[in-house]
Image (tube, grey):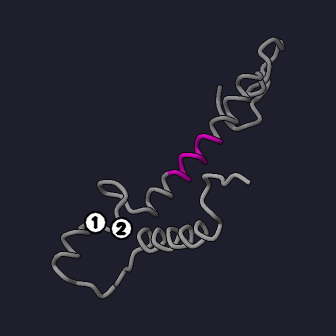
Amino acid sequence: MPRSNRPSRRFVTPVLALAVGAASLTLGGCYDPNNVSYNYITGHLSPHLMGLSERDVDVQRNVALTLDTNMRMIWGDLGRMSLLDSPTTLYPTYIYSTNGQSR
């Protein structure tokens, strides 16, 4: 019976487990909140900033505000596109606007 060139399962499983463990330690790191050494501080001068001047919560708030504004603008655009934003001008007398906006 010919042997295949694939490695045996007995070898692959421990190597895979070791690789996953090493990757989790490398990516997770060991964070010490009491580390106030000069090297740590100079290596992490702005740990809570995502951009030049915004924290992650500021960025999330801006994204939420932008998405909310865009969704409201889409509904307004759909109303104007379907000509449902104001009463018809073909009627002989003026019909007052129901949305409180002046014409």
Is 50 situated left or right of 82 in this image? left
Labelled disc at residue 37: none
Across and down, in percent, residue 8 comes to 63, 64
- Magenta span: 63-71
Asked if the magenta segment contains residue 67, the reply would be yes
User: Does residue 28 appear left or right of residue 7 in this picture?
Assistant: left
At a point 70% along the width and 25% down the height, the residue shown is: 80
Q: Which residue is mark 1?
A: 46
Residue 96 left/right relative to 71: right
Tell me residue 65's x, y (percent): 54, 51
Magenta segment's dominant SS is: helix
Q: Is residue 39 left or right of residue 54?
A: left
Dot 1: element? loop
Residue that appears at 76% across and 29% down: 96
Q: How many marks?
A: 2
Q: Secondary structure at mark 2?
A: loop
Q: CA distance from mark 1 to mark 2?
A: 6 Å
Pick the front one: 51 or 26:
26
Indicate the quadrant where residue 79 lies.
top right
Give the residue type that dot 1 points to. Ser
Among all residues in the image, which is located at the extreme right? 91
- Of 88 and 72, nearer the camera is 72
**CB under 8 Å between discs 1 and 2:** yes
**Amino acid at pointer 2:** His
- Mark 2 lies on residue: 48
